[in-house]
Image (cartoon, helix red, strand yellow):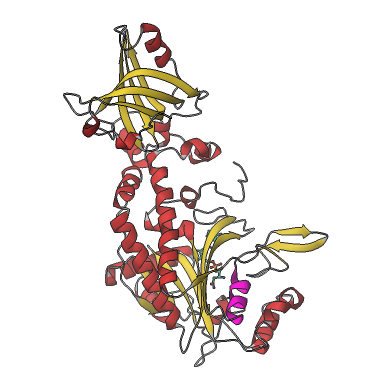
Amino acid sequence: TRKWTEVEQLEKELADQTVLVRARIHNTRGKGKSAFLVLRQRTATVQAIMFADETTVSKGMVKYATQIPKESIVDVEGIVKVPEKSIDGCSQKDVELQVTGIRAVSRAAVLPFELVDAARSEEEVKAAAERGEVMPTVGQDLRLDNRFLDLRTPANQAIFKVQSAVCQLFKTTLLAEGFQEIHTPKLIAGASEGGAAVFRLDYMGVPACLAQSPQLYKQMAICADFNRVFEIGPVFRAEFSYTHRHLCEFMGLDLEMAIHEHYFEVLDVIEKLFGAIFNGLATTYAKELAVIASQYPFEIPTFKPLRLTFPEGIAMLKEGGYPDVDPMGDLNTELERALGRMVKEKYGTDFFILHRYPSAVRPFYTMPCSDDPAYSNSYDVFIRGEEIISGAQRVHDPELLTTRAIECGIPLPEIQSYIDSFKYGAPPHGGAGVGLERVVMLYCGLNNIRKTSMFPRDPKRLTP
Ligand code: 4AD
């Protein structure tokens, strides 16, 4: 077999060597007997030149090449040359390919939009409009309808590298902390987070649901002496919220652990975990972050471990211009963002934990505070004032759990085996659920969760 070369490996050191490259036609310019092509392989680009001098290539070959549609996949054989001037606009600036042969492997149909249009930032388009220029761009829906194309843009390639990195850092950090990876069922008998937002389905003639979280099963794993567990898996929510931060299917990064004395043991793990994620992204993925920022400008978020109690948060909001905030109610998006801004100003961090929420606004399985059951051993975690995590110490007493489930209107038969799992000795434990798409969206300061979901599912979208 012949030796294939990756576009990103095309450097000066290969000068005068013949290489074989499989890439896409990113751009073509032909004039007379010559043609200039830009070849793209993922995010790497290189210029390829053709001259019809009848020794290297024929006139017919040049014509054939210029007629291959953009985005087609081609096999190109060529000689690596070092041009006099470096080539602007290509990632491989110091070399070009002198084409000796080209063949279309897979031809692209007419594109629904130009990839450069899809890659234009809203800021760029706005700035151009202010200068009186019209710069075409495509709306998010058209991009998502053709997501397989939209994903080819440099920013999207980088976003999903970052997404992969977050999962990797989540895994390696927790494994080092003594956690074990588990996989829990997604087809389950009853709702795991309350009945409203659940997808119901028929399971061999009996009613069933898609799991709204691994909540009940990760806790049963703790009862089964797994001690510290995590899971990366899909989470389904039949929520009719058509917002910038809700999906009907998202990736849950869940963790659950036995604790000795205090739910702060879980907060210690969360801080260590996000310290590692923030640091790992900023150092190892600086290139990807810069590519994302060139399409969607943002500043790298700052990380400091910071814990505020819910009452402290309420006090900050009251002083900061929200005197009517309900001290025992949940925080809406506007209040969370306002608190995020105040925290940033006062403590200089884009990351913080709010803990000791009122019991009334938390799920039935949440442990009430021992000193005041109106509050609970629970927490939310924020990046740039938006929630990325919620978690708590759990009730591990089956009687209290039964009472709480009845109070919250949960049908007991659906969760009987969950309650039973606490009957035979259950360690005190707590955990958290992280939304992967939200972490990437908020870390990168993006304005919509659909940008960080490869094929988003929302109330209006089930394809592609
Ligand atoms: O706040 P949630 O619903 O909490 C749970 O699922 C608990 N079982 C977690 C626990 O361990 N106690 O979801 C957890 C996280 C949220 O903080 C948010 O980041 C994300 O999941 N999330 C969503 N992401 C996208 N679309 C949605 N509809 C989401 N709902 C929650």
Q: Nearer the viewer, residue 325 or 459?
A: 459
Tell me the residue at 47%/63% (across/down): 333
Residue 316 placed where, x, y %?
A: 36, 75
Tell me the residue at 71%/62% (across/down): 209
Check the image and report above or below for 265 versus 139.
below
Would residue 276 be found to the left or right of residue 409 on screen?
left
Q: Nearer the viewer, residue 452 or 238?
A: 452
Tell me the residue at 34%/38% (across/down): 126
Residue 339 placed where, x, y %?
A: 38, 69
Is residue 314 in sight in this rendering? no
Would residue 48 be found to the left or right of residue 403 on screen?
left
Task: Examine the image and state in which quarter residue 413 appears.
Answer: bottom right
Name the dominant secondary structure of the magenta segment. helix
In the image, residue 222 lies in the stretch drawn in magenta: yes
Please, which residue is most extreme toward the front here?
1
Check the image and report above or below for 371 versus 6.
below
Q: Nearer the viewer, residue 314 or 29?
A: 29
Please, which residue is most extreme toward the left here?
84
Please, which residue is most extreme toward the right here?
205
Task: Examine the image and state in which quarter residue 351 appears.
Answer: bottom left
Residue 275 placed where, x, y %?
A: 34, 68
Magenta region, residue range: 214-224
Would residue 40 be found to the left or right of residue 240 on screen?
left
Q: Quadrant of the C terminus?
A: top right
Residue 287 placed where, x, y %?
A: 30, 48
